[in-house]
Image (tube, grey):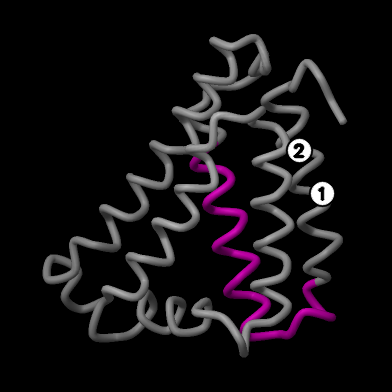
Amino acid sequence: MEVLKVDDQDTIDLFLDEGPFWPAFKRWITELQTQIEEVDQSLLLARAEFFISSKFVKNKGDFPYISERYERTASVIEKVIHKGEERGEFEPRLSPALISRYLISCINGLMLDSFQLGNEKTKVKEQLSVLLFSLEQMINPLEKE
């Protein structure tokens, strides 16, 4: 669990950068693609197994980290969107709270499907490209690269 926490902090640190936020979102999606496609060399498989293990499912109260992780990740994404809006980088078309949860659900679903079915069947690269397109439509970055 401690290793997973460190890995999660690395993801959060990506968004704490003071540079433009749209490129940070794009880097995050690119890193996710690499992690999903190279599942054997990352913590993603261990994380997925931990989160869906029967021990966790039966005793959710004993593992507050999972709920805390979800809320922390959603909060960071939401804050980045708000901060981007304040800095004139984004004009969100939807609620940042909904956008952040949508992203998490899409990514988690793609990860689980890819673990079970393989990258070729789930078309990881293509799906993440669609996710990035939809994210761009939702947050509406004003200066697109």
Please, what is the three-letter code of the amino acid marked with disc 2?
A: Ser
Q: Quadrant of residue 141?
A: top right
Say above or below: 29 vs 141: below
Residue 72 within the segment the image draws in magenta: no
Q: Secondary structure at mark 1?
A: helix
Residue at 36% of width from left, 66% of height from top? Answer: 6
Residue at 53% of width from left, 37% of height from top? Answer: 17
Which residue was labeled with disc 1? 130
Q: Is the residue marked by circle 2 packed among few (<14), some (14-19), or many (20+) residues within 10 Å? A: some
Residue 121 within the segment the image draws in magenta: yes
Say above or below: 52 vs 27: below
Query: How far, Cα to Cα, is label 2 from label 1?
Result: 6 Å
Say above or below: 126 vs 89: below
* Residue positioned most to the bottom: 40
Residue at 61% of width from left, 70% of height from top? Answer: 111
Say above or below: 99 vs 29: above
Quadrant in which the C terminus appears: top right
Percent position (x, y) of residue 27? 70, 49
Percent position (x, y) of residue 53? 34, 84
**Residue 140 or 95: which is nearer the viewer?**
140
Percent position (x, y) of residue 88? 65, 9
Please, what is the three-letter code of the amino acid marked with disc 1?
A: Val
Q: Main secondary structure of the magenta part?
A: helix
* Residue positioned most to the front: 18
Q: Which mark is residue 134?
A: 2
- Residues marked 2 and 1 touching at CB (< 8 Å): yes
- Range shown magenta: 100-122
Percent position (x, y) of residue 62? 12, 71
**Residue 145 or 67: which is nearer the viewer?**
145
